[in-house]
Image (cartoon, grey):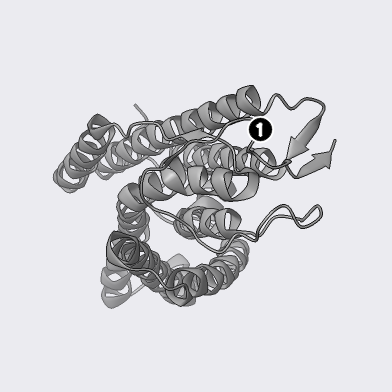
Amino acid sequence: MPVTCALTIREDPLLPISIGALCYSCFTILLILSSSILLTQAETGLQQKARLLLFIDAFLMFAVATAHLVVVLVYSAIWDRLQHDPTVEDQMLASRLQTLIIFLPNVNAVCSVRPRYHLESDAALGSQCQNISRQCVQSLPHSQFDDIASVASYTVGLIAAPIAYQVNGCYGQMIGVTFSLFNNVSAISFIAYRPWQHRRLFQKQCKHHGTWTEIERMLYIIVESGALYCLAWVIYAVGQFTPVVRLNDVMLTAIIHLSGIYPTLVICLVHREPRRSGSSVPPVSTLEFTSLQVACSDESCPPVVTISR
């Protein structure tokens, strides 16, 4: 257990702010694109509610990310004064800002739990399999245990971390990061398992070899981006307890925006219209959020759009 750990930005904040602003810009663009997808398509019933839930969640994450960027900018404005004879007011303000810099990323991690499961591991992928290939897609059952475990873990983390902060700030930070890391690792592992099952079923039914279909490439991108997102949380955790000061500073400003970039990126990927091969493949005009089970025989299934390796 280290005696001290990085609880705030410790060196010149110019580089962390630059990278954080870049990530924030990407998040803003993806939020605009994903919001147009979620709000412009006409849906009814549960689909409309699911889309509205995803939009509200993405907007809240964007609001938290904006607040975090403002806090970092304010902290950078007083950073020079903190290095040379800070006043009591400066120290009190810095203490509040440091708490927000550490706490807000965990808020975005909590916001992204349930919609991320719905969007990436349920029928959104199955819907694209149906629309792009018209093949048989059997949606996998959703595990309620994953939801309960995630909510319980985040709740314990949010309650235990502030208590531990009162004893030792480093202990509190370790608890908060550990629970966030655990939930993201479990979520990405679960999300990666479902696309792998969809891809395996798809290849088995279509008996297609030597080429990549649009849906296979999309699933691959989603799984790989999920792995990178999980790796970002690992780097964030490592940076808190190592002498790599720059790593800690950069991840403190970037991780909160990455938490919003990933789910909005998946919305855009799932909605992306496939390249056409002739007129046999209809455009992708819907994004379903309910379980799908579409049956068709091999004779009735039209050709599959492919992309050469």
Question: How many circles with numbers are drawn on the protein?
Answer: 1
Residue that badge 1 annotates: 299
135 and 270: which one is in front? 135
Dividing the image into 4 quarters, which one contains the N terminus?
top left
From this view, report whether residue 87 is shown above or below residue 171: below
**Residue 120 location in percent, x, y?**
46, 45
Percent x, y of residue 133: 64, 43
Does residue 271 appear to the left or right of 236 in the view shown?
Answer: right
Give the residue displayed 57% in from the left and 43% down from the top.
129
Residue 296, compared with residue 270, is above or below; it is: above
Residue 204 lies in what quarter of the image? top right
Dot 1 lies on which element? loop
| Residue farthest front in this picture | 299
Three-letter code for the amino acid on which mark 1 is drawn: Glu
Q: Going 42% across and 69% down the picture, which residue do you hit?
A: 62
Which of the pair 157/279 is nearer the observer?
Answer: 279
| Mark 1 surroundings: few (<14), some (14-19) or many (≥20) residues within 10 A | few
Quarter that holds the C terminus: top right
- The residue at the point 70 percent across, 53 percent down is 281
